[in-house]
Image: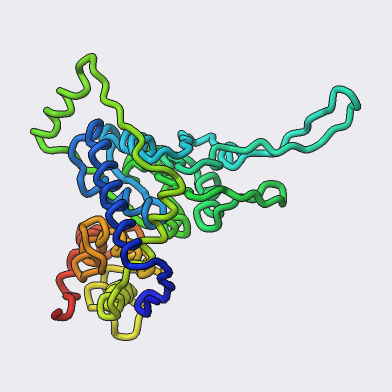
Amino acid sequence: MSTLTGVPVLLDPAEVKTRVKRFQDVQAAIKREVHKVIIGQEQVIENVLISLFVGGHCLLTGLPGTAKTLLVRTISRTLGLKFNRIQFTPDLMPSDITGTDIIEEDPGTGHRTWTFVAGPIFSNVLLADEINRTPPKTQSALLEAMQELSCTVRGHQYRIDPPFFVLATQNPIELEGTYPLPEAQLDRFLFNTVLDYLTADDELKVIDLTTTTTQAQAEVVTSAEEILEFQQLVRMTPVAESVGRYAVELVRATRPMSNGDAPDFIKRYVNFGASVRAAQFLVLAGKARALMHGRFHVSFEDIRALANSVLRHRVLLNFHAESDRLNADDVIRRLLEFKTPPRE
């Protein structure tokens, strides 16, 4: 039994070794298939895969034309999962996401009954495209599903079969016609990963790939059942107490009101810090990253490498930061310089 994770390990070592090998083969195959369609964006692809292997949701932020939607479509195709897409618009209603009850009449008896018509949320991979182009009321329709794997319509609760991932894309909030996501919904996302412009060489590869008659297609490499097994394998990955404590200390240092844990620049620039969920996600994501890099233990480097993506949407800055032209990434980068890991 694993005393470090609190999760009983019931598999023998040979079986664990076999599953780890399969995990690494599948994640390498997914990356290979995705790169048939997507050029570059290595870090973004890794973050999305970590979200899938952890069982979390991922928010992809980037300017229009940076292949956010194409990336999600391509990854979902390699997973062999049921895929649905919602294009968020200002007039989208919550029932357009969850589904609704309709009245159906039996032609023979004339008897009328309520029938539930499921919405696109009943899928394995849900692409919430341009999620911040719809008002908060509709955005919040996803909250229950993201946390509880269920949705409630007219007082009736309907279960969503696992695995279930929300991969949401959003444009930077400075663009016209966008609505900032509520903090409660932002906290449900494991990562907020940023897609930037490609290098000149990668842009040239995109031109070569997309302006000919040949169209690249990604192939299916895994299944829903195997992904659920991978999620269990990730949770079995051990994390040393010192690494777990470092993750907790890093998260606590983002809270300006904590008792002596926050440095002075956090107290100056941050209104609200990260929640306990951030520490949970930081450790879980570290486990998945360790496995993807061929290790069966979590290192301090795993925690530090994932800190920006886990924390950037959970650290809410104040007007002092805006006045000094600082964003969340700047503050987190400074925090990582301040909060170095203990010596091994």
- Residue located at (30% from left, 75% from top): 244
Q: Position of residue 140 (x, y in %)?
A: 53, 50
Q: Position of residue 80 (x, y in %)?
A: 41, 38
Give the quarter of the image for residue 2. Answer: bottom left
Q: Is residue 206 above or below residue 12?
A: above
Q: Residue furthest top?
A: 213
The residue located at (38%, 68%) in the rendering is 280
Residue 29 location (% of width, % of height) = 26, 42
Tell me the residue at 16%/75% (across/down): 340
Question: Which residue ends up furthest to the left in the rendered image?
Answer: 201
Colouring used for the render: rainbow
In the figure, is residue 276 to the left or right of 320? right
- Specify the quadrant that holds the C terminus: bottom left
Residue at the bottom extreme? 259
Furthest toward the right, the residue is 109
Q: Is residue 227 visible?
A: yes
Q: Is residue 316 visible?
A: no
Residue 344 is left or right of residue 215, and the answer is: left
Left-right relation of 211 to 19: left
- Pinpoint residue 20: horizontal percent, then vertical percent: 30, 58
Front residue of 196 and 190: 190
Q: Quadrant of residue 285?
A: bottom left
Quarter containing the N terminus:
bottom left
